[in-house]
Amino acid sequence: MKKLLAIIAVLWAGGAIGYWYWDDARSNRPRFRTTTVRKGDLMTTISATGTLEPEEVVDVGAQVAGEIISFGEDPGDRAKTISYGTKVDKGTVLAQLEDKLYKARVSQMRASLARDEADVQQAKAKLRQAERDMERNRKIQSRGPGFLAPQDHDSALAAHETSTAALLVAESVVSVARANLEEATANLGYTTIRSPVKGVILDRRVNIGQTVVASLNAPSLFLIAKDLSRMEIWASVNETDIGSIHPNQIVRFTVGPFPNEPFQGKVSQIRLNASMVQNVVTYTVVVAVDNASGRLLPYLTARVEFEVEGHRGVFLVPKSALRWQPKPLQVVPEEREEYARLLASRGRGHDMPSSSGAKEGILWVAQGDTTRSIKVQVGLNDGILAEVSGEGINDGTAVIVGVERREEADDASFLPHTQKPAESKTTAEKPKR
């Protein structure tokens, strides 16, 4: 009986040890995380940030000094006055300056002109008198020598020449007086500030009662956007990316008020006056935008994506699938020797190709508890997805992106052996319907 109990104890201990080894080996079997190759469109882009600006802005100033006494009427609502956001036409009265001094100056110049014109008439009368004196002297001289004293002839001739010169002086004074009157009249007209263009008031920088002082630089009173149906984005592009930007390039962008709605524009200008901030050189790229809907407002921040190159209908995989590599013992026996040489020549990991040009890469697929390699050509990548091609790559092929840790597998034992990764945001375009 004791011998039987001993045999049973030995068998139980051996079974327990065998189960422990079997369970440990089972739990140490790798559980690969996979994703599927899918077919789609890929677009490489350059990201930048810019500001929406009106295409043409007019800064309306004052040419004369004076106090603001009133604003003009709103053309759309006569009960309102000109203010922020008012739509104005060319010639619309924006503001009125105090004009008493300028009216007085006009009256003064008119009086001065009238006086100078009277002086012209007086000079003409003196000239006519001198001409009559000269005519009488000629008749006396015609009677013969000795009838007219020489000094009388000289006096009449000098009086005629003096009268002629006086008339010219009086007429020039009249011309100056007319110019002064025109200047005074123009200054009086400048007290009424009018819109030089048709547009929208972006900013009103004065209030009633404020005194405008004209100087060498005209004070800014109103800022008018000429046409908000056409706007521009001034985007700052890093010097390393500026070589990929060219005129008429398609640009997609979003703004804060509509974060999920993409807008489109085209590159219209690359400005050459680069700026440097903390040794970082950037260039300003101007993007033309159609704003016929009026939804885009001036000075919104735009997140810009310049479309550099795109391919449609290509096989796409996450970049992590190209970076992942198995341990040598996880590779199928027939590929281990070649894989060991590859690791020795390249070191750990595979270099991810850049977005230009095709390079070789390796994807791994599960084969039982081991993995098998698929050599591919890698094309464009947008930072998240990469374009691949080669034999063995098909739409739906499951490629490995990593291995689950043991504790993760224990906590998520309910998950299927092969699972799809969560969707992530990417700049790859969705296939069009």
Image (tube, helix red, strand yellow):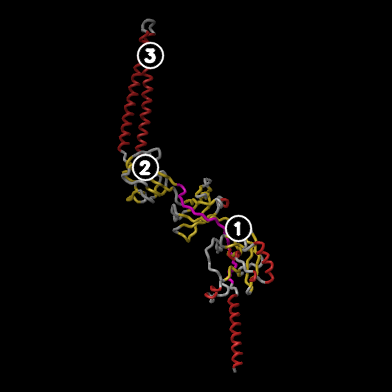
Give whichever of 129, 3 is nearer the camera: 3
Q: Main secondary structure of the magenta part?
A: strand
For mark 3, what is the residue? 157
Nearer the viewer's eye, disc 3 or disc 1?
1
The quarter of the picture where the C terminus appears is: bottom right
Few, some or many residues within 10 Å of mark 3 (<14, 14–19, 20+): some
Q: Which residues are magenta?
A: 32-56
Left or right position of 42 against 116 = right
For mark 1, what is the residue? 354
For mark 2, what is the residue? 193
Few, some or many residues within 10 Å of mark 1 (<14, 14–19, 20+): some
Identity, as a three-letter code, of the amino acid under mark 2: Ile
| Secondary-structure class at tag 1 | loop
Asked whether residue 38 is drawn in magenta, I would say yes
- Closer to the N terminus: mark 3 or mark 1? 3
Spot occupied by residue 266 in the image (x, y as percentages of width and height): 53, 52
- Going 38% across and 20% down the picture, which residue do you hit? 165
Identity, as a three-letter code, of the amino acid under mark 3: Leu
Compared to 306, does 121 lie above or below? Answer: above
Spot occupied by residue 370 in the image (x, y as percentages of width and height): 64, 72
Few, some or many residues within 10 Å of mark 2 (<14, 14–19, 20+): many
